[in-house]
């Protein structure tokens, strides 16, 4: 057996426990918040190209959510080990997406020319200064999300949206792949009217591109405070490549994305 195929116990635990279950040496044995690593059903493949795309009413409404986006950066966490937001550069713009496990959402955006930073964190909750353990109780209202800073002169928000859709399962509203629960969902959080309009247009386009017969459930919501997650979550795929790849494979993420988006599902 080649060395690359030797999977350590830590990697197997990540597969079993799901996103966020970092090795004990880094995460101090954080409790798991996901269900069993079983792949969701794949839906019915389209037999023709003229099936009308379906976009359901978003499962999460704007009730109780600010009518205008919150653009103020969250204050620095009082808890040790939490990451900090990078200082915004002149001319830089920010996009916020939720796509389930934030470990898996960083890499597709960091590969894009014009993206200056990708931060994993928590948003859309009612508790200030959340930590992984707090969010894992499923009582804070937060979802795992990423904050993408980018230069709009190099990469457009529309391109970010295309990358977003092709890395999520928009047909579920209670899980993403093997990670189940209200912290693992797909969301687009707009910060400007232009972002909202672009997101709405992209959702229509995504419905046409989808390879399964199922409604798109991903809501488009005004941005709220984004709290950076712990340092050990940042760039997890770089720091722990074996555990990351084992988790991703065990979660069935790539297989499901291929079924949903075909060749557009590139990671």
Image (cartoon, rainbow, N blue to C red):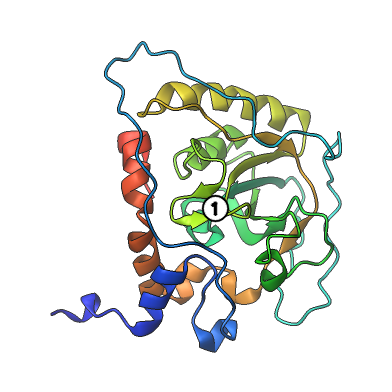
Q: Position of residue 10 (x, y in %)?
A: 40, 82
The answer to whether residue 177 is left or right of residue 8 is right
Farthest residue, direction bottom? 25
Point 44% across, 51% down: residue? 177
Farthest residue, direction top? 50
Point 72% across, 28% down: residue? 194
Q: Nearer the viewer, residue 13 or 148?
A: 13
Tag 1: Cα neighbours inside 10 Å, few (<14), some, or many (≥20)? many
Can you tell which quarter of the image residue 45 is in?
A: top left
**Element at badge 1?**
loop
Above or below 149: residue 236 = below
Q: Position of residue 187 (x, y in %)?
A: 62, 42
Above or below 173: residue 26 = below
Point 30% across, 37% down: residue? 263
Above or below 143: residue 189 = above
Q: Is residue 59 visible?
A: yes
Q: Position of residue 247 (x, y in %)?
A: 39, 66
Q: Position of residue 108 (x, y in %)?
A: 47, 51
Q: Nearer the viewer, residue 72 or 225?
A: 225
The answer to whether residue 71 is left or right of residue 116 is right
Q: Is residue 113 visible?
A: no
Above or below 100: residue 16 = below
The residue carrying mark 1 is 100
């Amino acid at each position: 057996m080649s060395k690359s195929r030797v999977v350590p116990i830590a990697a197997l635990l990540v597969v079993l426990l799901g996103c966020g279950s970092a090795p004990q040496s880094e995460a101090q044995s954080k409790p798991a918040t996901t269900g069993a690593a079983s792949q969701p059903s794949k839906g019915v493949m389209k037999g023709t190209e003229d099936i009308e795309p379906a976009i359901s009413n978003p499962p999460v409404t704007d009730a109780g959510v600010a009518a205008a986006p919150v653009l103020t950066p969250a204050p620095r966490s009082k808890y040790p080990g939490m990451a900090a937001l990078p200082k915004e550069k002149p001319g830089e713009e920010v996009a916020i997406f939720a796509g389930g496990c934030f470990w898996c959402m960083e890499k597709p955006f960091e590969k894009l020319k014009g993206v200056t930073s990708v931060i994993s964190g928590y948003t859309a909750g009612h508790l200030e200064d959340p930590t992984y353990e707090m969010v894992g109780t499923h009582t804070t209202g937060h979802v795992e999300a990423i904050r993408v800073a980018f230069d709009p002169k190099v990469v457009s928000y529309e391109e970010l949206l295309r990358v977003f859709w092709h890395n999520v399962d928009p047909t579920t509203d209670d899980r993403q792949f093997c990670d189940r629960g209200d912290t693992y969902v797909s969301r687009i959080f707009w910060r400007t009217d232009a972002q909202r309009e672009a997101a709405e247009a992209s959702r229509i386009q995504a419905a046409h591109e989808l390879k399964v017969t199922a409604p798109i459930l991903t809501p488009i919501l005004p941005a709220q405070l984004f709290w950076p997650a712990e340092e050990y979550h940042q760039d997890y795929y770089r720091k722990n490549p074996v555990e990351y790849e084992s988790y991703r494979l065990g979660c069935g993420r790539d297989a499901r994305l291929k079924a949903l988006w075909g060749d557009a599902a590139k990671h």
